[in-house]
Image (cartoon, helix red, strand yellow):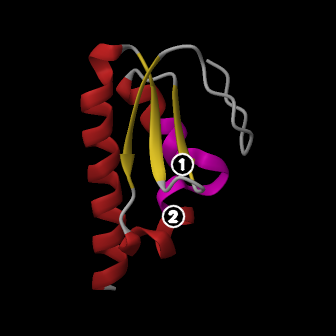
Amino acid sequence: MQHHQGVYNPPIAHYRHFKTKPEWNDHIAKIIGKDGCHFIRMTMRSGCKYIWYNEKEGVIELWGPHAVLRNAQRMVEEHIRSIVDEIETS
């Protein structure tokens, strides 16, 4: 698995995306993590090949085997909720 930090380079794979919410925008750097560490961790744990925040389209893209994409989306959404909740309660 190859990661190109900060360079958009999706694999040939099944694709799924979901819209980001406006309240996430101020926290997107923390959601992604330093050098993409959170997205990289979730990519490996979920079985995806690639997770990317598409700022222009306002979506988070998931690339990988069809069978893992739905659970990968849940994993990313749970991560986002935990980050946003942590920030809002501190």
Residue 52 vertical position relative to residue 22 in the rendered view, above or below = above
State how many labels appear.
Answer: 2
The correct choice, above or below, for 40 with respect to 35 in the image is: above
Q: Which disc is residue 28 wearing? A: 2
Where residue 87 appears, as percent x and y from the top left, is 37, 78
Is residue 3 left or right of 14 when viewed as pictured? right
The reply to whether discs 2 and 1 touch (Cβ–Cβ < 8 Å) is yes
Q: Quadrant of residue 89?
A: bottom left
Badge 2 crowding class, 10 Å Cα cut-off, few under 14, some 14 to 19, many 20 or more, is some
Q: Position of residue 48 (x, y in %)?
A: 43, 23
Residue that mark 1 sits on: 53
Nearer the N terminus, badge 2 or badge 1? 2
Along the viewing direction, whichever of 63 and 81 lies nearer the viewer: 63
* Residue stretch in magenta: 30-41
State left or right for residue 18 relative to residue 35.
left
Q: CA distance from mark 2 to mark 1?
A: 9 Å
Q: Residue at x 48, y 70 (%)?
A: 25
Secondary structure found at label 2: helix
